[in-house]
Image (cartoon, grey):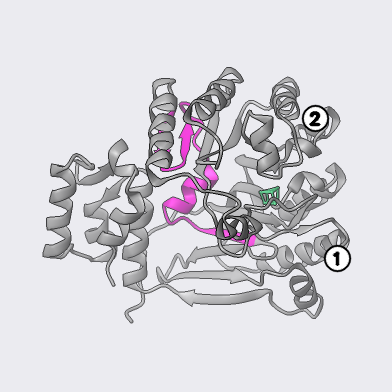
Amino acid sequence: MKPGRIPSVPDRFGVYVHVPFCERKCPYCDFYSVEGTDLKDRYLNALHREIARASRRPNAAAVDTIYIGGGTPSLLTPDEIERLLGEIGRCFTIAGDAERTIEVNPGTTTRESLRMLRQLGMNRLSIGVQSFDDRVLTFLGRIHTVAEARSCIETARAVGFENISIDLIFGIPGQSRRGWEDTLKEALALSPDHVSAYSLIVEEQTPLFALVKSGSVVPVTEEEEAAQFTLTMSFLEDSGYDHYEVSNYARPSCRSRHNSAYWHHHNYLGFGPSAHSFWVDARSGEAWRWANVRQVGGYCDLLWREGSPVAMAEELGTRELVNEMIFLGLRSDGLSLPALTNDLGYELSGEQRTYLHQLLARNLAVLSGGTVRLTREGFLFCDEICSHLMTS
Ligand code: SF4
């Protein structure tokens, strides 16, 4: 396989920190996390070691974005977050205008903890609301109530967060389209700057999967899921939100800089169990992706032995980079055909061109200035369209 080359990447890079603890595991979730915080001290020591090891990385310019995700990062105390930020600042230069996001679960925050987070310099909050219906929150196994979610958003504003994102889920068994619309209305009444709206995926290896398999839970039909997705797009776009990625909507100037960097092949380093990293060497243009071990115990052991927590690393070939550019582009701002040619030296095949023309003719995509963008209708078939266009 021919190694891929990315001719230029911005100097700045992103930092992701995975906090792998949750108070209770939600039955639909397949993110890596464990219940309880027994391993927290060991994990934090190991995490600081991993960050210190990475600071030896050559060509590392300033950190543009910090994203503390999970799991439930709000299970860390403000002191622990302060030490973590201190370690990142000791090992790297953090840009003065860096975006600093932390995910919080409304069931684990207080006015004081939110105030402390703001005081520590976190300037973007991502709140895992999921629904404004208490029955749906119970079905999802969430530890918080609607009242707590609302209070978390209002308090975050009151203590000075000017950039608040909320996560919502649609396509939930038992929830009607009307119920989902009510959740969207309640969400907008709180004026979030950014909304991430995901459809519920029944992932294998989750308790929800077992419930569906046994027939105790009946998933929503594809038609209903598509109808709720269409409702989401029109509702949020009509309310002034920019639909800039298949699941993400932002007010002007409030796109997630951190996540946008993932979708544009910018460099980022991931720390913590199961975290992924992507790095393009500035001189050679070689692109590497790697992932840490998933288990928090194994992660700590490896770092205590002065070893590396990396479980998988691969240099990306041209084919992978082309496929990623197609997939990431169509999910977000669009696929730039000139960039495919000029950056990666790739020309679409006759079959791919024919398929693109079909998408345009069926109004599933539009072409403007050499960039192919999916329409609302096209987003309904995003995965199918991407896999059709990707090369094998
Ligand atoms: S709180 Fe979030 S990360 Fe934790 S189990 Fe629930 S969905 Fe998963």
Q: Is residue 208 visible?
A: yes
Disc 2 from disc 1: Cα separation: 27 Å
**Left or right: 19, with 14 as reference point:** right
Q: Is residue 310 above or below residue 157?
A: below
N-term-proximal mark, 2 vs 1: 1
Where residue 240 appears, as percent x and y from the top left, is: 43, 22
- Which residue is label 1 attached to? 42
Question: Label 1 neighbourhood size at 10 Å, few (<14), some (14-19), many (20+)?
Answer: some
259 inside magenta stretch: yes
**Left or right: 378, with 140 as reference point:** left
Q: Is residue 126 visible?
A: no
Q: Is residue 325 above or below residue 186?
A: below
Q: Secondary structure at mark 1?
A: helix
Numbered circle sitting on residue 115:
2
Residue in view at x 69 percent, y 65 percent: 273
Pick the quarter of the image with the N terminus.
bottom left
Where residue 44 appears, as percent x and y from the top left, is: 81, 60
Numbered circle sitting on residue 145:
none
Q: How many marks?
A: 2
Pick the quarter of the image with the C terminus.
bottom left
- Which range is magenta? 241-270
126 inside magenta stretch: no
Task: Identify residue type, mark 1.
Answer: Arg
Mark 2 and 1 residues: CB-CB less than 8 Å, in contact?
A: no
Task: Identify residue type, mark 2.
Answer: Arg
